Amino acid sequence: MTDPIALARAISDGVLFPGALEVDSSDIVPVDRLDRLASAGFYGLAGPADAGGMGLADMATALEIIEIIASGCLTTAFVWIQHHGAVRALTDAPQALRDAWVGRLCAGELRAGVAFSGLRRPGPPILTASPDGEGWRFRGFAPWVTGWGRIDVVRVAARRENGDIVWALVDAKAGPTLQAEPLRLAAVNASATVTLSFDQHAVPADRVISIQPFDEWQGQDRASLRVNGSLALGVARRCAFLLESDALTAELDECRRLLDQASPERMPDQRARASELALRAATTLVVLGGGRAIALDHQAQRLAREALFLLVFGQTAAIKAAQLHRLYDESHG
Ligand SMILES: Cc1cc2nc3c(=O)[nH]c(=O)nc-3n(C[C@H](O)[C@H](O)[C@H](O)COP(=O)(O)OP(=O)(O)OC[C@H]3O[C@@H](n4cnc5c(N)ncnc54)[C@H](O)[C@@H]3O)c2cc1C
């Protein structure tokens, strides 16, 4: 079996990075990039071996693969990374759901997105679930859903009347009760990110993955913040390579080590460190490149815009506070 890290490097350096500017200027990530990841088995990154997934025994390998793919083309990595939560959730779902979905998701025959960020917003839920016979009706909106037009299903989180979360697999098809409003973005625009609106959208019982107490999810969310840090490490990694900087590479290694070791309480600080490193590394690349670096066919400006984007993507209240502390308080006493 091919070493998955070596395979990720070959795809990242040989396919993704050379085509990253083309993706950056596209309206939607070309499907061949996603097909390439699927044919390498990377849509099964989080899947069990018995369903055709990679069956990785250690998280460190998965994180390194994410970092390497992100260092090739952040847009492609960003669309792809949304998929894995559905694979994990369906692996633990009732057998019929597992059997129906996990194999095809691991193979990349079907691709998934996710819509859960509204759960982090304080105040009344922005997406609710009401019982309707055996199933549910979803009403409200999901502010960010990435991959629209490249995904078949979305793993959606909606809150029921007692506050619990109804996690369901919804077809990624617009219709009278499901509207997708495209967002124009200053970076990763080809990620085809939309705001999804649900107008009493019917969700059959056999699409419900689980019903979870909100407190339990909050604990899991705090414990899962490490993964998105690998996107920032990926941007910094590409910059360190282009700058041929041993100092930056050493800093990147230290940043990764701190992320790997961080407790849930310390994770927001380490996520802020990783985002700041990506920003500084990409800014250095722009400065070094001079005026040319700001042309749309230059990698430096792309990486700098992506580093800016990573300041806000996956930002929780705690990460936001940690970032503001690093970027502002530390230089203003
Ligand atoms: C381009 C892009 C694509 C994305 N794609 C997806 C996707 O496919 N699926 C997905 O689920 N998510 C996606 N996200 C969401 C991403 O994880 C969010 O960036 C993150 O959840 C923060 O959301 P937000 O910046 O909209 O801020 P908000 O939701 O407004 O909140 C930001 C933080 O501040 C806190 N906060 C907000 N208001 C208050 C207040 N009044 N008082 C106290 N604290 C407050 C919130 O708790 C939150 O932690 C995407 C985001 C971006 C930018």
Image (spheres, rainbow, N blue to C red):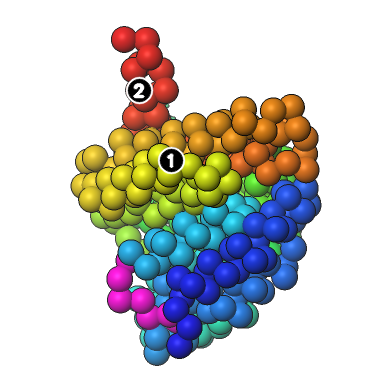
Q: Is residue 98 above or below residue 286?
A: below
Q: Is residue 279 above or below residue 241?
A: above
Q: Assess mark 2: CB under 8 A from ligand 1?
A: no
**Residue type, label 2:** His
Q: In the image as oriented, which residue stretches furthest toward the top?
A: 333
Task: Tell me the SS state at disc 1.
Answer: helix
**Residue type, label 1:** Leu
Tell me the quarter of the image containing the N terminus.
Answer: bottom left
Say which mark, if any, is on residue 158. Answer: none
Residue located 40% across and 89% down the image: 50
Q: Assess mark 1: CB under 8 A from ligand 1?
A: no
Q: Which residues are magenta?
A: 53-59
Who is closer to the viewer here, 247 or 1?
A: 247
Q: Is residue 11 above or below residue 66?
A: below
Q: Relative to residue 324, is residue 113 drawn left or right?
A: right
Instruction: Determine if the magenta segment contains residue 56.
Output: yes
**Residue annotated with mark 1:** 248
Label the magenta part by its dominant secondary structure: loop
Residue 81: x and y, percent?
52, 60
Residue located 22% across and 41% down the image: 265
Residue 281: x and y, percent?
51, 36
**Residue annotated with mark 2:** 325
- Front position among marks 2 and 1: 1
Tell me the quarter of the image containing the C terminus.
Answer: top left
Residue located 42% across and 23% down the image: 327
Instruction: Determine if the magenta segment contains residue 211.
Output: no
